[in-house]
């Protein structure tokens, strides 16, 4: 069978980096082709070339045998190549209808026919089984719904190739399953799907073939049978992966000393049911639960970014009368948010400036860190976290997702916190960086730090947490620790609570 | 009703309340005569502000409106002395406004220059050109000017919809159609909402930016034409500071300076609220004219705070 899209000899040079080096990639009709690689392997660049967001320095793209040179995402989409990028790219202030039909709004007498546009929007969403008010702004919906809207947008009526870059990163199991059904349906209609995900089990569930990129080169291509998961991971990272999965953390680091932070029936009306929580030195507490179960809210409430309206938070045994992000930072409690794009890093600032940001504001502007001191701390962090950047002055926005996440972590760590709250520390980053962050969390706990980790990935939680608090419907429904902590047990706890 | 109309509704409510308050305070205030006069007297600034609305919805700013109004008047007055018919010079100036705006848009997009700076340069440039042409006021003597100000539609209740007001209302209808029933209008909202996403969604960035500033240039030139005919003269200082009044009208009308959210119709009410306040203070007779600016400033402040909370309740978040 001939390929629906065929990229050959694609090269792309960025200042200082050879992002793509003579890469071959093809997708056949009715095939799901997984594109795998570590952060900075060139996945995003390859997709951008395929969808017209970047022009390659060399190589050709053939769509159904005909050479094309898409000069913009719009041109690529018109040719039949739809894409959903890693971070949802929609206009939050505009209505769902406008977001779905922008660029090809239906017209009557030269003017836009809004009732037809609404019908198109509803029909596009109906294909994904989504039924929402299409007149509301996209920003008023949850990230998961926004993701589905973005996919609905990419699905042109005559699309022949659909690129999905981390489409399941913010979806829960049901939503993921629904998406997979849609993918299977599209495959049956002869579309070629390019699937990128850091969930390896999902890749094997949905893909037919896998292409592996490393450092801008294609290192392997083959069917899922030809590339089993262990081989895949070693191809991706180019070294043997430490077997961290399900290797439970040792309890040796946990000192039975007094908790640093204690939450007593702390909650907030209509947001979180009151819960109890202790954070002890050397202990990692995991927050598990489905999407929307209240993990992020719990993390934010403990940090003080969400005010509690019942119960009491005590730090070192002293009740904290006005628990706020400021008082938390002063007490040595830091927080790494989930959404690094909108809540975390400042993409225009350099790696050094991003890392120093929180420390400097904690010290106050009267106690400026000397440039030398800043550079020393930054160099230390870049080395400690293995941040891949040519130098400390590179704007963070130009780094890959995993390295942005590490910069965010570095910002929290540079002030030597006693308590570190991580919300989805590995969202949207891939295996190698994932393993490094897992290792880092363990090291931090071993040094006596107290950690609270909220994550949608059970394997990750099981690997790092001494205790796991299970959440469901904005309520803490159970605590699992020690040997009884298994995937099955957590799922049972979530299910049993209904 | 969708919550996106709340700021617009609030603006209209303030206008209605002020108008009723005027009617209760002063006899003869509550009439179509006063309403017609507010429309006619503020038509030129509202026309210019309508153009600015597009710029602000797209996340930009246009500071050269006031100078454009002055420049258009001065050129029209001199062309009048040279024997041009006002309609011919008006057509020329509107074409000039569109061309000037296109150039501004091109510089903003191609050179990636902040709209604030380039339009500030335009403010100085156009004002300087006014003084190059004339230092004094020049009357426009063509009899058409008188005919223009005598034209209009009588309203029930003795009021009068002047030709300026009619031009403004036509300009409004055109702008509303552009904003809400064309692909370009949607592109303006998209760029203002999130330029990066808009680009990825295939919005033609350069074409749209050019058109936005061309539209603003056209509307401010049209505002200048209406002002020249309304005052039947060209004066090199005319329109000084009006760019800020136009921005105030846009903001009072519920448009966010951060872009992505707003309505053209809101701008008309915003401009009329400012005109209404001036009228109210004139009716009082004993109040110092300074109160016009003071109350305008206070109202602007209250509106901005109010919008902050309204928009906060919508939970707009950066796309993620």
Image (tube, rainbow, N blue to C red):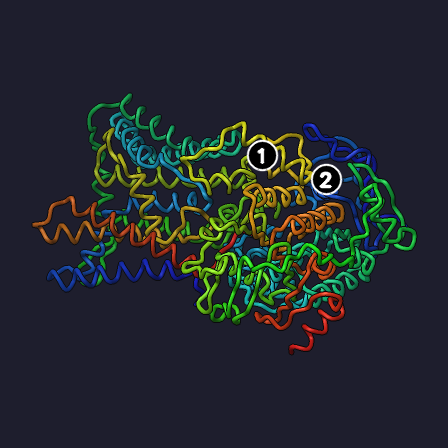
Task: Identify the element where label 2 is drawn.
Answer: loop
Residue displayed at 69% across by 28% down: A16
Residue A81 in view, yes or no: no
Q: Earlier in the sequence, mark 1 or mark 2?
A: 2
**Residue A93 at x, y percent in the picture:** 50, 54
Which quadrant of the structure image shows residue A413? top right
Q: Is residue A298 left or right of residue A318?
A: right
Task: Please state the chain letter of the residue tagged with numbered disc 1 in the rendered image.
Answer: A
Which residue appears at 63% of the width and 37% of the height? A381
- Point out the residue furthest to the left here: B286
| Tag shown at residue A36 | none
Whole-percent x, y for residue B128 in the image: 31, 24
Side of B266 relative to A74 (left or right): left
Which residue occupies 12% across, 53% down?
B283
Residue hosting label 1: A377
> Would residue A171 appear left or right of B293 to someone viewing this image?
right
Q: Residue at x 84, y 45 (%)?
A: A240
Q: Nearer the viewer, residue B223 or A163?
A: A163
Residue A40: mark: 2
**What x and y, as percent, mark residue A409?**
61, 45
Image spot of residue A361 (x, y percent): 46, 41
Q: Are marks 1 and 2 on the same chain?
A: yes
* Front position in the image: A303 or B200: A303
Asked whether the viewer can see residue B315, the reply is yes
Near mark 2 (Cα within 10 A), the count class, few <14, some 14-19 or many ≥20, is many
């Amino acid at each position: 069978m001939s390929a629906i899209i065929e990229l050959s000899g694609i090269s792309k040079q960025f200042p200082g980096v050879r992002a793509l080096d003579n890469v071959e990639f093809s997708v056949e009709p009715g095939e799901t082709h997984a594109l795998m690689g570590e952060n900075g392997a060139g996945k995003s660049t390859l997709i951008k070339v395929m969808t017209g967001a970047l022009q390659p320095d060399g190589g050709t793209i053939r769509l159904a045998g005909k050479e094309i040179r898409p000069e913009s995402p719009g041109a690529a989409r018109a040719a039949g190549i739809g894409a959903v990028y890693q971070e949802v790219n929609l206009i939050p202030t505009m209505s769902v209808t406008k977001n779905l039909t922008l660029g090809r709004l239906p017209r009557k007498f030269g003017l836009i026919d809004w009732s037809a546009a609404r019908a198109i929007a509803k029909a596009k969403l109906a294909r994904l089984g989504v039924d929402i008010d299409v007149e509301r702004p996209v920003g008023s919906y949850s990230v998961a719904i926004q993701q589905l809207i973005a996919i609905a947008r990419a699905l042109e009526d005559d699309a022949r190739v659909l690129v999905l870059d981390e489409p399941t990163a913010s979806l829960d199991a049901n939503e993921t399953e629904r998406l997979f059904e849609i993918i299977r349906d599209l495959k049956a209609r002869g579309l070629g799907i390019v699937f990128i995900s850091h969930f390896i089990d999902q890749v094997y569930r949905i893909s037919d073939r896998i292409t592996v990129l490393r450092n801008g080169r294609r290192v392997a291509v083959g069917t899922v049978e030809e590339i089993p998961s262990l081989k895949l991971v070693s191809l991706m990272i180019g070294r043997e992966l430490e077997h961290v999965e399900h290797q439970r953390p040792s309890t040796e680091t946990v000192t039975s000393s007094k908790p640093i932070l204690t939450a007593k029936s702390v909650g907030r009306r209509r947001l979180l049911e009151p819960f109890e929580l202790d954070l002890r030195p050397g202990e990692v507490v995991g927050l598990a639960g489905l999407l929307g179960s209240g993990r992020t809210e719990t993390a934010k409430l403990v940090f003080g970014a969400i005010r509690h309206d019942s119960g009491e938070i005590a730090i070192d045994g002293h009740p904290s009368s006005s628990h706020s992000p400021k008082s938390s930072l002063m007490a040595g409690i830091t927080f790494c948010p989930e959404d690094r794009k909108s809540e975390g890093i400042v993409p225009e600032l350099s790696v050094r400036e991003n890392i120093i940001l929180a420390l400097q504001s904690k010290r106050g502007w009267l106690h400026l860190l000397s440039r030398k001191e800043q550079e020393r701390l930054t160099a230390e962090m870049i080395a400690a976290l293995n941040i891949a950047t040519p130098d400390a002055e590179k704007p963070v926005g130009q780094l890959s997702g995993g390295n942005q996440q590490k910069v965010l972590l570095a910002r929290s760590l540079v002030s030597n916190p006693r308590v570190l709250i991580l919300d989805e520390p590995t969202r949207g980053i891939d295996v190698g960086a994932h393993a490094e962050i897992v290792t880092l969390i363990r090291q931090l706990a071993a040094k006596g730090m107290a950690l609270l980790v909220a994550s949608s990935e059970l394997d990750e939680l099981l690997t790092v947490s001494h205790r796991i608090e299970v959440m469901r419907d904005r309520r803490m429904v159970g605590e699992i620790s020690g040997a009884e902590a298994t995937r099955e047990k957590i799922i049972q706890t979530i299910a049993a609570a209904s | 009703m969708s919550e996106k109309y709340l700021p617009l509704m609030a603006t209209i409510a303030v206008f209605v309340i002020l108008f009723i308050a005027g009617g209760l305070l002063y006899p003869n205030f509550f009439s179509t005569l006063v309403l017609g006069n507010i429309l006619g007297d503020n038509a030129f600034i509202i026309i210019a502000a309508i153009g600015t609305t597009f710029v602000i919805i797209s996340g930009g700013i246009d500071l050269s409106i006031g100078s454009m109004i002055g420049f258009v008047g001065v050129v029209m007055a001199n062309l009048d002395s040279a024997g041009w018919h006002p309609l011919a010079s008006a057509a020329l100036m509107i074409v000039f406004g569109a061309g000037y705006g296109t150039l501004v848009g091109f510089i903003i997009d191609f050179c990636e220059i902040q709209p604030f700076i380039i339009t500030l340069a335009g403010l100085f440039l156009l004002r300087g050109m006014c003084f190059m042409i004339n230092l004094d006021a020049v009357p426009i003597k063509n009899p058409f000017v008188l005919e223009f100000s005598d034209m209009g539609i009588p309203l029930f209740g003795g009021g009068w919809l002047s030709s300026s007001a009619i031009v403004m209302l036509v300009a409004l209808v055109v702008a509303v159609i552009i904003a809400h029933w064309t692909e370009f209008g949607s592109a303006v909202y998209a760029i203002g909402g999130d330029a990066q996403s808009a680009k990825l969604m295939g919005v033609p960035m350069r074409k749209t930016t050019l058109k936005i500033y061309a539209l603003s240039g056209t509307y401010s030139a049209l505002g200048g034409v209406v002002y020249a005919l309304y005052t039947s003269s060209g004066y090199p200082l005319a329109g000084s500071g009006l760019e800020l009044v136009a921005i105030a009208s846009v903001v009072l009308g519920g448009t966010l300076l951060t872009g992505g959210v707003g309505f053209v119709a809101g701008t008309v009410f915003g401009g009329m609220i400012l005109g209404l306040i001036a009228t109210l203070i004139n009716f009082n007779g004993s109040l110092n004219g300074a109160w016009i600016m003071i109350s305008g400033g206070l109202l602007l402040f209250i509106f901005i705070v109010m919008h902050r909370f309204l928009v906060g309740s919508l939970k707009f978040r950066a796309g993620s």
